[in-house]
Image: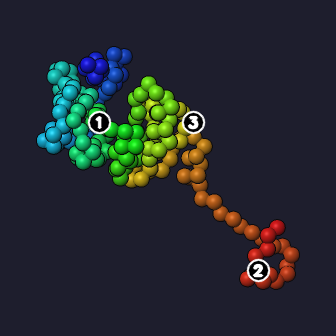
Amino acid sequence: ERTNRITVGHPLEDKTDIGPLALSAQLTKVESYDASGVKEGARIASGGKRPQAEELARGWYFEPTVMIDAKNDMSFMRDELFGPVVGVMPFSSEEDMIELANDTRYGLASGIWTQNIDRAMRFANRIDAGTVWINTYRSAAYMSANGGFKESGYGRRGGFDVMREFSRAKNVVIDYSGAMQDPFVIRLR
């Protein structure tokens, strides 16, 4: 119901909540993963297609999609889609949820929606992802380091941590005494 109120449109229009995908190939990928999810047993609760509005027909738009009855072994749940698709998967316990969330070779980001902040923090501390959003998604602080874990992303961007990504530390030690030093003795100064 809430997903159906999201406005898909031109990114420069004030009323737009979500714009197009970046590439035609990305749109094709998202459509393919949606179709495979349905074929594998998931059901589309909302979205799941290109918008019908005439002004969006030529763009790479895709409706925000909620897929229910998702399972962790479904292809759209295993891969990074980079499209407006979310799979809803039940879990039996906190431990089960953590195991399901970490059972992937990727770790770019994760989202948790709950009214229990203590629970959210327990999850966030144990989920193996570079960013964990709680009760929000796709927001970032300007000075925070962003990047994924595992096979996701290309290092860190933003914040002070990024300095390590673009630096290479080197020690150069010089002894000006002129005395011959024993190369097998470590001298701490």
Question: Could you say which quadrant of the image residue 22 lies in?
Answer: top left
Identify residue type, mark 1.
Pro
Mark 1 vs mark 2: in front: 1
Q: Nearer the viewer, residue 102 or 161?
A: 102
- Mark with earlier residue (2, 3): 3
Which residue, given by chain and number where applicable, does mark 1 sit on?
90
Which residue, given by chain and number where applicable, does mark 3 sit on?
143
- Secondary structure state at the residue bearing disc 1: loop
User: In the rendering, which numbered label is found on residue 185?
Assistant: 2
Q: Residues within 10 Å of mark 2 (few under 14, many from 20)?
A: few
Label 1 and label 2: CA atoms lie apart by 61 Å
Q: Nearer the viewer, residue 173 or 34?
A: 34
Q: Nearer the viewer, residue 156 or 99?
A: 99
**Residue at the image position 29 percent from the left and 19 percent from the top:** 2
C-beta proximity under 8 Å, tags 1 and 2: no
Seen in the image, is 71 located left or right of residue 11? left
Give the x, y percent position of residue 47: 21, 27
Identify residue type, mark 3.
Met
**Residue at the image position 50 percent from the left and 42 percent from the top:** 125
